[in-house]
Image: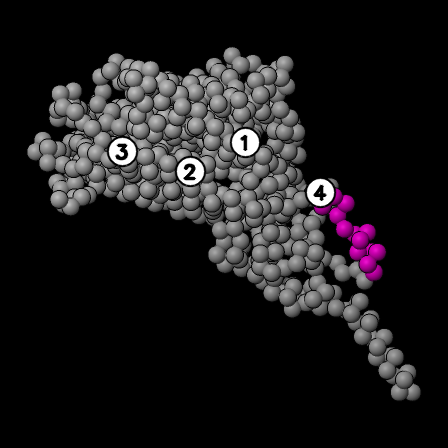
C-alpha cells in the first residue's frame, strides 16, 4: 500500500507539472508589451521595467520560455513592415539577453505568422509565455522554421574602433597642436596650443549634446533630426543594453556609443584645422564663438549629406531600395565617394580657413617681414604624430577590422611616403634644397589627399595620388597662395583644400576596377559591385566634382555669415599692440619658453 501511495503521489506530481504548472505560470507571468517609436527598431528606455520583470520571472521559473510576437503596420510595403517587425523582435531579444536571459529561452515568432495591425498595435512587440513541450522532439518541431539572425555586435570590431578613436585624438592633441605650434613665432606658441585644445574640447561636448544627432540620425537630405539629443537612446542604463550601429557589412554591427565617439574626434579635428589659417592675430573668444556657429551650420550638415545612410541591412529587398536611398544624405544619394573625410573634413575646413584669412585680415608686417617657424623640431614631431594617428582616421573609417581597413591602412602608409618624396623632389628642383618643413608638409599633403580614397582605391592608385599630392600641394602653398593674396598663416587651404579637392577627384578615377580599385556598390540588396565594363570614370569624377562644389559653396556661405556675426558681437581681431607683443602674454598671460 505504501508503494502504491508513493507511485500515486509521483503520478500526481508529473500530471501537475505537465498539466497544471503551465496554467500557474501563465497566471503569474507579467503582462509585457514593448511599444516602439513609429518607424524605429530601438528598444525604448521605458521598456526596461517590462524586460526586467520578464527576466525575473524566467529566473524564478527554470523551465519557462517566452515568445516574442511582432506586428506589422498594414499600410505601405508589407515586406518593409515585416522586416521592421522582425528587427524589433530581435532588439527585444537582445535586451532580454543583456538582462541575463539565455537566448535558448526566447522563441521568435515565425516570419509567416507576423500579423498586421493599426495604430499602437503596429508598433508593439508582445512577450508571452511560450508553450512548454515535454518531449525534445516536439520542442524541436515547434521551433521557428526560419529563425532570423540577430544583429551581431562584434567585440573585435568595437575594440578596433575604440583604438582608432584614440589614434585620432593623438592626431589632434598633441599631433596637430605641435605641428601648428612649431610653425608660428615663439610669442604665439601657447595661443595656438590653446586654440587647438580648447576648440577640440568644445566641439566634443557639442557633438554629444546635439551634433551627433544632427549628423547621424534620420531627418532630410541636408540635416538629421533630434532623436539622439544628449545621446538619448544610445544605451539603456536600467537594462544595461547598448544600441547597435551599422557597419558596411550586412548583419555586422558595432556599439553605437563607440561610433559616436569615433565621429566626435572627426568633428573636433576638423574645427581645429581652421585655426591655422588666422593664427597669430585673432581673439581667443572669437575663435570659440565662430567654432560653435560653423560646427552647427556647416560641419554637421555636410557630415550628414556625405555619410548618413540607413545601413546595409535596411536594403532587405529591391522593393525598399528607393525608400532607403531617399532617407540618406544628399551626397550619399548622388553616389559621392568619401571614405574618411575629403569633403567633410579637409575641404570643409580649408574653405572656412581661407574665408577667415580674408575676413580677419593680414598679420601686421605680412609681406614685409620674415615670419619664420620658431621650431621645426616640434613641427616634425607633430607631423609624425599626425601620420601615426591618421591610420586610425582612415583605416578606422572602414568601421570593421576587415580587408578594407587593411587596404585603407596600406594606402595611407604608401601615399604619405610618396608625397614626402614628391614634395622634397619638387622643392629641390624649385629652390635647390629640400627642407624639413617641406618633408613634413608633404606628409600632411599625402595624408589629406588619400583620405577620401583610402579604402576606395587600389595600392598603385594610392601611390599615384600621393605623388601628385606632393607636387600639387607644393604649388598650392606657393603659386596659388600668391594668386589668392591671402595671409593663410599655416597654409590650411594650400594643403587641406588643394589636397582634399585633388584626392576627392582622383578617388573617382582610381576607384575604377579597371585601374585596380574596388569599384562602387551597385546593389546593396545583394552587395553586388559595379562590373568593370559598367564603371564610368567620367561619370564618377563628375559626381565627385559636384560633391566638392557643394561643399565649397556651403562652407563658404556659412563661414562668411559666422565670421560677420562674431565680428559684430565681440570683434575678430586683437588690438595692434597685443598682436605685436604676442598672443601668449596678451591673451593668456603666460609664455611658452622661459627667457
- On the picture, is 532 further left or further right than 233? right
- Which residue position is annotated with label 1? 407
Q: Which residue is mark 2?
A: 388
Circles 3, 1 touching at the beta carbon (< 8 Å): no
For label 3, the residue is: 376
Task: Tell me which residue sits at (82%, 71%) in the image.
Answer: 15
Residue 389 pos. (x, y %): 41, 38
Q: Nearer the viewer, residue 294 or 496?
A: 496
Q: Is residue 141 magenta?
A: yes
Give the quarter of the figure containing the N terminus: bottom right
Q: Tell me, yes or no, whether the two marked residues, 4 and 1, touch with CB atoms within 8 Å.
A: no
Q: Residue 272 is drawn in which quadrant?
A: top left
Residue at (82, 58) in percent of width and height: 136
- How far apart are the alpha carbons under marks 1 and 2? 16 Å
Between the C-alphas of marks 3 and 4, the distance is 65 Å
Give the residue furthest to the front: 432
Point out which mark residue 111 bears: 4
Q: Which residues are magenta?
A: 135-147
Q: Left or right of 106: which side holds 174? A: left
Residue at left offset 82%, top offset 72%: 14
- Residue neighbourhood size for the residue with mark 3, other residues' Cα within 10 Å, grouped as few (<14), some (14–19), many (≥20): many
Label 4, secondary structure: give it.
helix
Label 2: state its secondary structure. Answer: helix
Amino acid at each position: 500500500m505504501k508503494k502504491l501511495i508513493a507511485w500515486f503521489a509521483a503520478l500526481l506530481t508529473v500530471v501537475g507539472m505537465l498539466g497544471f504548472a503551465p496554467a500557474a505560470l501563465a497566471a503569474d507571468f507579467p503582462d509585457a508589451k514593448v511599444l516602439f517609436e513609429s518607424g524605429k527598431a530601438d528598444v525604448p528606455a521605458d521598456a526596461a521595467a517590462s524586460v526586467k520583470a520578464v527576466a525575473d520571472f524566467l529566473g524564478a521559473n527554470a523551465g519557462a520560455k517566452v515568445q516574442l510576437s511582432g506586428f506589422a503596420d498594414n499600410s505601405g510595403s508589407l515586406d518593409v513592415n515585416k522586416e521592421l517587425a522582425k528587427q524589433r523582435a530581435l532588439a527585444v531579444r537582445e535586451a532580454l539577453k543583456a538582462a541575463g536571459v539565455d537566448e535558448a529561452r526566447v522563441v521568435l515568432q515565425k516570419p509567416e505568422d507576423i500579423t498586421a495591425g493599426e495604430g499602437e498595435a503596429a508598433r508593439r512587440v508582445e512577450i508571452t509565455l511560450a508553450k512548454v513541450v515535454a518531449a525534445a522532439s516536439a520542442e524541436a518541431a515547434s521551433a521557428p522554421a526560419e529563425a532570423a539572425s540577430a544583429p551581431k555586435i562584434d567585440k573585435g570590431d568595437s575594440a578596433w574602433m575604440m583604438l582608432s578613436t584614440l589614434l585620432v585624438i593623438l592626431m589632434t592633441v598633441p599631433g596637430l597642436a605641435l605641428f601648428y605650434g612649431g610653425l608660428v613665432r615663439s610669442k604665439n606658441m601657447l595661443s595656438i596650443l590653446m586654440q587647438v585644445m580648447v576648440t577640440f574640447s568644445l566641439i566634443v561636448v557639442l557633438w554629444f549634446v546635439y551634433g551627433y544627432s544632427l549628423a547621424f540620425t534620420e531627418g532630410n537630405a541636408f540635416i538629421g533630426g533630434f532623436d539622439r539629443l544628449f545621446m538619448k537612446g544610445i544605451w539603456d542604463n536600467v537594462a544595461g543594453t547598448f544600441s547597435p550601429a551599422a557597419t558596411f557589412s550586412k548583419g555586422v554591427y558595432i556599439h553605437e556609443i563607440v561610433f559616436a565617439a569615433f565621429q566626435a574626434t572627426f568633428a573636433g579635428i576638423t574645427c581645429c584645422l581652421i585655426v591655422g589659417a588666422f593664427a597669430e592675430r585673432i581673439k581667443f573668444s572669437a575663435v570659440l564663438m565662430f567654432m560653435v556657429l560653423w560646427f552647427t551650420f556647416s560641419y554637421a550638415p555636410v557630415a550628414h549629406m556625405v555619410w548618413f545612410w540607413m545601413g546595409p541591412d535596411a536594403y532587405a529587398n529591391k522593393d525598399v531600395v528607393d525608400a532607403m536611398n531617399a532617407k540618406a544624405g544628399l551626397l550619399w544619394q548622388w553616389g559621392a565617394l568619401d571614405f574618411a573625410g575629403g569633403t567633410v573634413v579637409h575641404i570643409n575646413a580649408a574653405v572656412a580657413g581661407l574665408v577667415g584669412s580674408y575676413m580677419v585680415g593680414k598679420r601686421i608686417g605680412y609681406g614685409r617681414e620674415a615670419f619664420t617657424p620658431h621650431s621645426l623640431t616640434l613641427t616634425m614631431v607633430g607631423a609624425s604624430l599626425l601620420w601615426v594617428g591618421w591610420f586610425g582616421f582612415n583605416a578606422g573609417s572602414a568601421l570593421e577590422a576587415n580587408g578594407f581597413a587593411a587596404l585603407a591602412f596600406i594606402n595611407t602608409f604608401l601615399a604619405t611616403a610618396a608625397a614626402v618624396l614628391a614634395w622634397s623632389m619638387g622643392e629641390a628642383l624649385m629652390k635647390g634644397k629640400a627642407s624639413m618643413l617641406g618633408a613634413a608638409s608633404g606628409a600632411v599633403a599625402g595624408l589629406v589627399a588619400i583620405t577620401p580614397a583610402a579604402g576606395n582605391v587600389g595600392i598603385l592608385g594610392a601611390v599615384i595620388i600621393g605623388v601628385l599630392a606632393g607636387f600639387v600641394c607644393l604649388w598650392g602653398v606657393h603659386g596659388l597662395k600668391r594668386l589668392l593674396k591671402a595671409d593663410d598663416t599655416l597654409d590650411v587651404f594650400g594643403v587641406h583644400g588643394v589636397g582634399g579637392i585633388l584626392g576627392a577627384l582622383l578617388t573617382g578615377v582610381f576607384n575604377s576596377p579597371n585601374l585596380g580599385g574596388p569599384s562602387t556598390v551597385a546593389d546593396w540588396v545583394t552587395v553586388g559591385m559595379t562590373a568593370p565594363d559598367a564603371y564610368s570614370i567620367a561619370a564618377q569624377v563628375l559626381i565627385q566634382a559636384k560633391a566638392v562644389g557643394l561643399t565649397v559653396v556651403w562652407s563658404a556661405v556659412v563661414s562668411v555669415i559666422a565670421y560677420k556675426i562674431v565680428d559684430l558681437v565681440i570683434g575678430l581681431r586683437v588690438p595692434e599692440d597685443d598682436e605685436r607683443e604676442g598672443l601668449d602674454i596678451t591673451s593668456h598671460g603666460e609664455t611658452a619658453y622661459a627667457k
